[in-house]
Image (cartoon, rainbow, N blue to C red):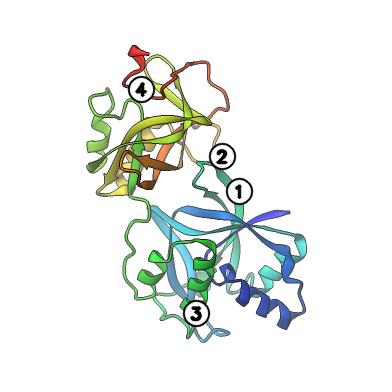
Amino acid sequence: MASYFGYGSNLCVSDWESWCAGSGVDSGGLRFVRRAWLPDHELAFSHDSRSRGGGVLDVVRREGQVTPGGLFEVNEECGSALDAKEGVPTAYQREEVVVLDDDGRAHEAFTYVVSASRRVGFVAPAPGYVEIVAEGCDALGVSTKMLHAVCENATAGWEIPCVFAYGTLRTGESNHGWIERGGGAELLGLGSVRGVLHDCGAWPAMLHGEGRVVGELWRAESPGVLLRTLDTLEGFAGWGDSRSLFLRGLAQVEMESGEAVLAWTYRYSASRCEGVVIPGGDWILRARE
């Protein structure tokens, strides 16, 4: 089985089943696993589809942005069918990517990007196409905010503009100045995420776990600038890069108000840590515990 990240018409079950029926293909080889996000990319209507009769979706680079979509498991037959549906390699080509889930984990997958020779400027969406994609998004719980922006050739707002800071980036701590250095941000308040916090002396390390880690939620003015700055501080060299000290990922932040906010955060790249566990998960209060 392979992992596939879908962001367009393949999110819609009825569209996929209709294509498979007309092509004599079993549609059952495509299984939705969970929502996911493709980092540093956004949607664009950059391809004029002859079969659809107008513009269809592509993903293009935009640092700090994320493209919402779905992570699927596909068998070999389904993978070949997807290639045929997407017109590989003429209209689209396969690309190996890393996508993120809201539990803070990264997944290797393939997706489709428009071939360079077929990528043009904005093309108005094909009749009914946006409705097809929106139907799939709604069924899977995928945000349509970006879809509705780019179908009007507008610049999409940041999908995830917030950063969760739980250690030396917090107010009054040694590295807090890096937040301002990254273009500035607004403090939204205190919250917590699922995980286990370790005291490594001069700095903390958060790992996956069933505890809670306390920190501050910051809304960035320029997420791309802030994340690039924090990547340097945290030693993040890229997903799957063994040089990374911390990995940038996503987390659901439970605010004191009860609101849940999806945010960027940095977790320790190793699966284990020699630092002492901080029972309350609060770096600021560690000396009192």
Q: Nearer the viewer, residue 146 or 109?
A: 146
Relative image position of residue 88 (x, y in whole percent): 64, 70
- How far is the residue under mark 2 from the one under mark 4? 27 Å
In this rendering, the label closer to the viewer, 2 or 3: 3
Circle 3: element type: helix
Numbered label tally = 4
Circle 4: element type: loop
- How far is the residue under mark 3 from the one under mark 1? 28 Å
Residue bearing mark 2: 240
Residue bearing mark 1: 108
Q: Would you say the residues marked 3 and 1 are in contact, meaning their CB atoms lie under 8 Å apart?
A: no
Name which residue lies at 38% across and 41% down.
254
Circle 2: element type: loop
Name which residue lies at 43% across and 36% down.
193
Residue type highlighted by circle 3: Tyr
Relative image position of residue 62 (x, y in whole percent): 39, 56
Residue type highlighted by circle 2: Gly
In this rendering, the label closer to the viewer, 2 or 4: 4
- Left-right relation of 185 to 69: left
Name which residue lies at 35% across and 44% down.
258
Circle nearer the N terminus (2, 3): 3
Circle nearer the N terminus (1, 4): 1
- In this orientation, does residue 214 appear? yes
Name which residue lies at 28% across and 41% down.
218
Circle nearer the N terminus (2, 1): 1
Is 209 situated above or below 227? above
Q: Would you say the residues marked 2 and 3 are in contact, meaning their CB atoms lie under 8 Å apart?
A: no
Quadrant showing the N terminus: bottom right
Is 140 situated above or below 182? below
- Dot label at residue 129: 3
Circle nearer the N terminus (3, 1): 1
- How far is the residue under mark 2 from the one under mark 3? 35 Å
